[in-house]
Image (cartoon, rainbow, N blue to C red):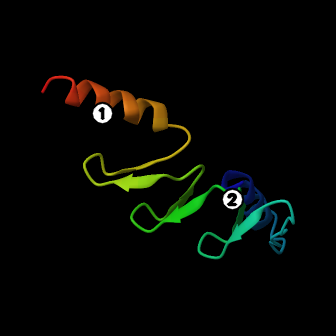
Amino acid sequence: MLKEELKKKDECERENRAYVLEISKQFDFCVICCSNIDSSSKHCKECDRCVDNFDHHCYWLNNCIGGQNYAVFILLLILVFSNF
């Protein structure tokens, strides 16, 4: 969602048109990013971006753990703690 809105905003700026944010009723709205997000998304204060299926911000990896990297994060934990 955020990428689509940023692309739309860039196009409007290039064409000197006013950018109008469309708020969709099927999505939630992040007031920090000013974009439509999925209901499972959350804005991370550390990364300053919205993350789909947000779980937590990992300070060890300095990255958010969410839908796209959750399985890799669990695999990392298994590998690290299997050596003990």
Of the image marks 1 and 2, the number of the one nearer the N terminus: 2
Number of residues whose C-alpha sits closer than 10 Å to that of mark 2, classed few (under 14), some (14–19) or many (20 or more)? some
State the residue lying farthest toward the left.
84
* Residue 80 versus residue 39 in the image, above or below: above
Give the label on residue 31, or none: none
The foreground one among 79 and 84 is 84
Nearest-to-viewer mark from 1 and 2: 1
Instruction: Tell me the residue at 85%/68% (across/down).
Output: 22
Q: Which quadrant of the rendered structure holds the N terminus?
A: bottom right
Image point (61%, 69%), residue name: 33
Q: What x and y, as percent, mark residue 69?
A: 48, 37
Q: Which residue is mark 1?
A: 77
Q: Which mark is residue 6?
A: 2
Q: Is residue 59 left or right of residue 37?
A: left
* Helix, strand or loop status at disc 1: helix
Q: Position of residue 55 (x, y in %)?
A: 48, 52
Residue type of the residue flagged with mark 1: Leu
Q: Is residue 70 left or right of residue 53?
A: left
Please say if the residues under marks 1 and 2 sit with CB atoms less than 8 Å apart: no
Residue 68 placement: quadrant: top right
- Residue occupying image coordinates x 47% and y 65%: 48
Secondary structure of residue under mark 2: helix
Which of these two is toward me, 27 or 20?
27
